[in-house]
Amino acid sequence: MKVGLFIPCYVDLLFPEAGVSTVHVLRRLGVEVAYPDAQTCCGQPAFNSGFFDDARAVARHAMSVFEEPDLDYVVCPSGSCATMVSRFYPKLFEDREGDRERAERLAPRVKELSDFLVNVLERTDLGARFEGKAVFHCGCHQRRELGVLEEPRELLRGVEGLELVDWQGDELCCGFGGTFSVKMPDVSTAMADQKLDALAASGADTLISGDSSCLMHLAGRLRRRGGDMRVLHLAEVLDSR
């Protein structure tokens, strides 16, 4: 099986270790990984801000990069960016026939990492080992658009040495929301504090998520509050030995 690796901007520029771990995990499972050098942003910031023509221009480029016929799937270590391509591209081009058809062909091949591992490769135990007590934060797009809720937890339960615990307000947004955190900083910070209060009450020593943007927001607020908890992308934990 050959997949195209779709790396979100946050991973590319700020958290490359999550991308490296994604490659390690996929290759360990016998997947051939191709990284198209021409890939750029998926267009979500422009889309969320209402600049739909700009978003379409970026989306057309992304489609041209990932619609190669020899790629069985496109795998992304982000529920947010995977949602943009698989759910919102067809809507973005719904009144543009040629582009809509391209978007609809690409959409079902785009998979968030845990979705791909569990539902395509049918693997939950990857032989990982990580000592700790952790909670998992599921980003809003992954939860509400993709419906990929249990897959990351199944993978984490298969990690030797890791205790996965429940926490209050698990379903709540972290407060990042992309441009929302810039436009509504006070509300965004209050939402992060709500999550971090629940995190402290859980007794966990590690926060894990499948979205680096959520982790960036929560880790930044955590440090400002004086916390030193480990904050890791799901791929990094699955890559642990």
Image: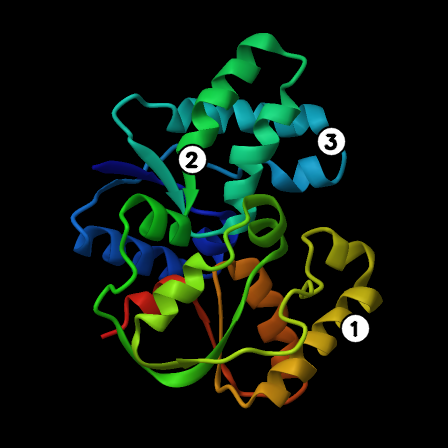
Check the image and report above or below for 114 versus 200.
Answer: above
Specify the quadrant of the image occupied by residue 124.
Answer: bottom left
50 left or right of 205? right
Q: Residues within 10 Å of mark 2 (few under 14, many from 20)?
A: some
Point out the frontmost of discs 3 and 1: 1
Say if 59 sits above or below 202 in the image: above
Q: Quadrant of residue 203?
A: bottom right
Which residue in the structure is indicated by mark 1?
A: 190
Between discs 1 and 2, the one toward the N terminus? 2
> Mark 3 or mark 1: which comes first in sequence?
3
Amino acid found under the numbered disc labelled 2: Gln
Q: Quadrant of the C terminus?
A: bottom left
Marks 1 and 2 close (CB-CB < 8 Å): no
Number of residue marks: 3
Question: Foreground residue, 190 or 140?
Answer: 140
Disc 3 packing (10 Å; few <14; some 14–19; many ≥20): few
Looking at the picture, which amino acid does disc 1 mark?
Ala
- Residue 47's spot in the image, x, y percent? 68, 35
**Residue 217 against residue 183 in the figure, above or below:** below
Question: In the image, which disc is placed on residue 17?
Answer: none
Q: How is the image coloured?
A: rainbow
Secondary element at image label 1: helix
Residue type highlighted by circle 3: Phe
Question: Nearer the observer, disc 1 or disc 2?
Answer: 1
Which residue: 56% across, 16% down?
A: 100
Q: What is the number of the mark on residue 51?
A: 3
The residue beneath circle 2 is 39
Q: CA distance from mark 3 to mark 1?
A: 28 Å
Tell me: 196 left or right of 8.
right
| Mark sitting earlier along the chain (2/3) | 2
Picture residue at 46% right of the left edge, 25% below the top: 63
Q: What distance separates the C-alpha of mark 2 from that of mark 3?
A: 20 Å
